[in-house]
Image: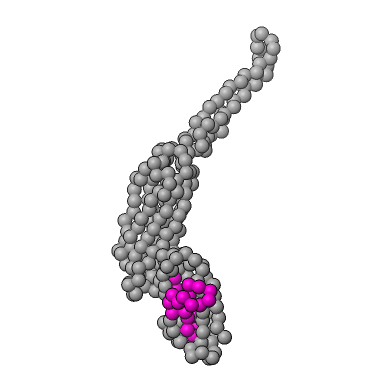
Amino acid sequence: ADDWFRVALAGGRGYRFETPGGTGDDFGRLFADAAGTVSVASDDDGAGAFQFRLDTTAAATQEYYLRITTAPSGGDWNGYLRWRELLAASLAVSPAQPASGQWFDVVLTVTNTAGAALNAPALALGPDAGASLVVLKASPSAPASIASGATASFTWTYSVSGAGPVAFSGTITGTDAATGRGLTAWAASAVIGGSPAALSATLIVTVPSATVLVQGDLVVVEVTLGNGGTATARMAAPG
């Protein structure tokens, strides 16, 4: 019998499907439709030991359908399906809510899970919204390659010039050293620029009703502090 798997893929990203460690002879074919009429890619023995290994780049963001059959039809096969992105990315911002004038970092972390190095990686990062609220201070250089199985992080440094939300997206592209296939990964994150801490204070002194204070009279001094900015103010204990 055929085994069918439904998978959600992102357009433009590269994926690998395989059945490592399986027994018997299998064949994998990926379809763009549930009826199994629009074939996208297929493989027979790419993983060795009569197991298939199928690499593909999704043409569109949608659900795809993978069919695993025995080769020849009617044979026996036992195993499991493993699939993953060939190039994965994540984007992080720190601190998440910097104040006006404060610097912050945007870090793109990339993992190459393909079986070969990623050659000539190219990096791109841009504010998708709120670009006028930040100023670029430093950007990273791309390496010559990223080894198979390696993880690399790249840091851009910005300063906040105005209050409001800023959306970032980071992209890395490169070429698989073994297949020549172009690979792309991207990720998104956001930061909220705030106004600096703006402290205010109110002092209230309460004294006895007597006109003249004498030693031992109780005087109450109350200080009320406020912060009119969006940034947190860190203060020492009052003294």
Indicate the position of residue 79 as horizontal and vertical percent values: 54, 82
Residue occupying the point 35% across, 45% down: 136
- The count of marks equals 0
Residue occupying the point 32% across, 72% down: 180
Which quadrant holds the N terminus? Answer: bottom right
Residue occupying the point 47% across, 46% down: 191
* 75, above or below 222, in the image: below
Indicate the position of residue 4 as horizontal and vertical percent values: 55, 78
* Figure quadrant of residue 112: bottom left
Q: Give the range drawn in magenta.
A: 14-42
Outermost residue on the top side: it is 211
Q: Is residue 24 highlighted in magenta?
A: yes
**Residue 212 or 120: which is nearer the viewer?**
120
Which quadrant holds the C terminus? Answer: top right
Q: In the rendered image, is residue 125 in sight?
A: yes
* 165, above or below 122, in the image: above
Indicate the position of residue 185 as horizontal and vertical percent values: 41, 62
Residue occupying the point 51% across, 84% down: 69
* Figure quadrant of residue 135: top left
Q: Is residue 167 highlighted in magenta?
A: no
* 81, above or below 134, in the image: below
Q: In the rendered image, is residue 24 in sight?
A: no
Does 215 sit left or right of 112 as displayed?
right
* Figure quadrant of residue 188: bottom left
Does 81 sit left or right of 102 as displayed?
right
Does 199 sit left or right of 126 as displayed?
right
